[in-house]
Amino acid sequence: MAYFAIFLAILLVYPTKIASLEVGFYQKTCPSAEAIVKSVVEKAFANDSGTAPAFIRLHFHDCFVRGCDASILLNSTPGNLAEKDSSANSGVQGLELIDEAKAKIESQCPNTVSCADILAFAARDSVSVSGGLYYTVPAGRRDGNVSRAAEAAANLPSPNFTVAQLKKNFANKGLSLDEMVTLSGAHSIGGSHCSNFMSRLYSFNKTYSQDPSIDPNYAKLLKKMCPKKMSGASIDQVVVSFDPVTPDRLDNVYYKNLEMNKGLLFSDQILWATSSTRKMVKNNANHGNLWAKKFAKAMVHMGSIEVLSGTQGEIRKDCRFVN
Ligand code: HEM
Ligand SMILES: *[C@@H]1O[C@H](CO)[C@@H](O)[C@H](O)[C@H]1NC(C)=O
Ligand SMILES: *[C@@H]1O[C@H](CO)[C@@H](O)[C@H](O)[C@H]1NC(C)=O
Ligand SMILES: *[C@@H]1O[C@H](CO)[C@@H](O)[C@H](O)[C@H]1NC(C)=O
Ligand SMILES: *[C@@H]1O[C@H](CO)[C@@H](O)[C@H](O)[C@H]1NC(C)=O
């Protein structure tokens, strides 16, 4: 009987501490939260379609480092370089728009909605505006209060990873090889700075100066946009679209491009060049609707990585600073 009472006590107390995520988490406490994020995302996208890929990448980079806890939004402080100032996060954008959504939400329901959930909602709404596919986002994430640049470099995948390295990197976060290939489809929108793929064009390896897996005409185009000797300013300014066919549309054309050897990053094209992932690429290229469903599901899974919930962490007042 005593054992049973202890068991019951644990059952009653424990769930509030590890409360997991749920759809409609703010329905009672801040019913307009999701609508506010949506309107910010839609307005920004109408002005600049580059905001959608920015939000999707922000959520990914948040979740892969210390879980989805908005650690990517924290500013560096004296003596601590934060995640966003790591070279692994170079090119991340959209932070001002997250601030805008957070400020609007705080004015309606202070201290209630986490920055981590705002990132997850913004990524979902970005998928929706750019891809026309919608999914519900389980919420209730809490914000962390630690952000270290070194952890971004250690946890985020590099554009010159092989499939074995990509597989291991995603497995470390509980994501499968198929989910890795499915989520890489996010590279059907947005773009990359030349520095992330220039070695494929000019200094691939000892035998080949140019990666032999690149379609020759595509390589010519890339070399024109990213000449061997780029000046300081253009290195930062030139961004090449991942998908030259439908650059602002989140779709499975990414996989069709890979089949034609028109993947931008080494880590993109290698998915086609490696036998274990080649059939997944083929499948996603041939079945767009199936890919879209898998993509939405994988985004939700990614959004659950190592989350803080219940009484863990905090609800930041300002996404750039711990309370
Ligand atoms: C598989 C391993 C991955 C690698 C090595 C990788 C690497 C990169 C690199 C190097 C860039 C270019 C950044 C720049 O130059 O500004 C980029 C952009 C991007 N990545 Fe990934 N990525 C990976 C997976 C993912 C995943 C899983 C997602 C989301 C689900 C994602 C979403 C994006 C988006 C949307 C952009 C465009 C950002 C923009 O235009 O603002 N990536 N990625
Ligand atoms: C519209 O987008 C441009 C860049 O693409 C940006 O400079 C500008 O601030 C945006 N305007 C608004 C109102 O968001
Ligand atoms: C990996 O890619 C970077 C660019 O992102 C490049 O500068 C570096 O030389 C590459 N490293 C290796 C080992 O290929
Ligand atoms: C260079 O790359 C090619 C194509 O990926 C590969 O077959 C070859 O073994 C590589 N050579 C060296 C020296 O790494
Ligand atoms: C970080 O958050 C924890 C609760 O999750 C709290 O105990 C700790 O005091 C916080 N540290 C700072 C520096 O805010």
Image: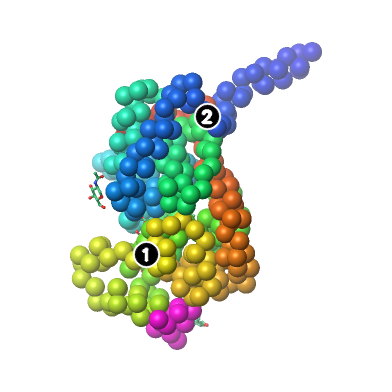
Task: Tell me: 307 left or right of 87.
Answer: right
| Color encoding of the figure | rainbow
Q: Residues within 10 Å of mark 1 (few under 14, many from 20)?
A: some
Q: CB at mark 1 closer than 8 A to ligand 1?
A: no
Q: Which residue is located at x 43 percent, y 33 percent?
A: 34
Residue 233 in the image: state x and y as whole percent: 20, 65
Any magenta on residue 33?
no
Number of callouts:
2
Tag 1's secondary structure? strand
Q: Quadrant of the C terminus?
A: top left
Residue 111, picture quadrant: top left
Query: Magenta stretch?
Result: 206-217
Is residue 162 among the parts visible in the rendering?
no
When the figure is inspected, residue 121 is found, relative to residue 251, above or below; the finding is above
Residue 82, picture quadrant: top left
Q: Which residue is mark 2?
A: 24
Q: CB at mark 2 closer than 8 A to ligand 1?
A: no
CA distance separating discs 1 and 2: 35 Å
